[in-house]
Image (cartoon, helix red, strand yellow):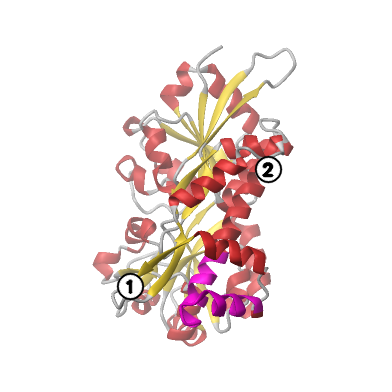
Amino acid sequence: MSEPVLVAIPPKGGSLDDVLKKLVTLHWLRPELVAAIRRVIKDDKRRVKLEEGLIALWRQSGHMVESTMRAADLFGHDLDDVEQALRRMRRYADEHGVAQLDYTGKTGVDAMLAALRQDGDPEVREAASGMHLQLDLTRPGKPSRMVLNHFEFSFAPTARSAEVRGILLGTDHEVTPTYLRKHKRDLSLTCYDAFHNTLLDALDTPKVRNWKELKAHLKETNTDVRILGSLGMDDYLGHCVLMNREQAAKAKALGGGRGWAANGSDPKLALLRGRPVLIDPQYEEVYDCILDARKQGITFEVGPKDIEKTCAEQGRVAIYIVRSGSTVACTPDLCVVGDEIITSETIVAVNQERLNHNRGIGTLVESLHPVDTDHAPAWRAKLAAKLGDRLV
């Protein structure tokens, strides 16, 4: 048997859910195992959200267990869950000597994961065995989270085919293409927007807005990374400009079309100057390239957790990932202005040098059947139906 194929997939979240479901349909993974993986990760996510809420209630309730329990009861939390959480969560004294509450520490979460590895359900045991702990750098307080580490699998297209041994690796979003490029991964099933920054030196222009444009402008002599196509999961998303209604009306009045920075004279860019645009910092280099931000006098700032509410209520402008538009739709006075800065979906990418030397990679690629379909028009139509006049 040839050496195993290393396949990068997201470590957690909706993207992981989508990829795992796809791999079940391809018979790479058992549905029972995938259900257990999703259950472990979702239960841990609920644990983190509960603890996040208790931290706020603790501060509002006089930094006392009893008053925090009463407040949690009023909000409808299960008091047994609350009591267990308060027992395991960390305490620390702030600069004024006041007792503060913090997320369960690494040792505590590690003990919870160890218990899952001894669970009575064999599928849960197997799921937990493939997890590890990772700091969630997107949340204030940086809690430890259970995320996918790795799972081994075997795949044969037919009963007479040679088996391919593969290893799914839960890879941090921003380093996936780097690992693929350095021969530390063979295949990648992750979103396109992770690839842009790491391939800038291999592009004949930095202004590419989707995987098709990146593929067309990729200088293959500069890298072994090859973009093979979409995984075909209809998991489209856009990095969109968010504004409140008043600013959105100004943007529409300025004209210049729906695109952003399609040319250097886009009048809408004036609304991005003055105050820093709120963003997720991992995409700053992408936005800088697309908007030609330095030349245009546009600066960026790390956005708060409730970035949508901040835009709607404080008049700030942000570039933020929009998938279905549900959050925008339920945030009063929030609008999506113009077309996306970039668009993304889960794509299939491979290291060509590794593909040439390991037949198993080709077998898995054939199973994945990357497609060349452009899902953007259908996604935009759904978004327009969801947002109505709030898609400006």
For mark 1, give the secondary structure: loop
For mark 2, give the secondary structure: helix
Q: Which mark is residue 36?
A: 2
Residue topped by disc 1: 94
What type is the residue that disc 1 sits on?
Answer: Asp
Task: Give the quadrant of residue 286.
Answer: bottom left
Which of pointers 2 and 1 lies earlier in the amino acid sequence? 2
Q: Is residue 100 left or right of residue 338?
A: left
What type is the residue that disc 2 sits on?
Answer: Ala
Q: Which percent across, then down, holds residue 62?
A: 47, 82
Q: Is residue 74 left or right of residue 172?
A: right
- Viewer-proximal residue among 186 and 221: 186
Q: Is residue 346 visible?
A: no
Q: Is residue 258 left or right of residue 21?
A: left
- Quarter of the image where the C terminus is located: bottom right
Q: Is 52 within the magenta?
A: yes
Q: Is residue 73 left or right of residue 198?
A: right
Task: Give the quadrant of residue 378.
Answer: bottom right
Q: Which residues are magenta?
A: 50-73
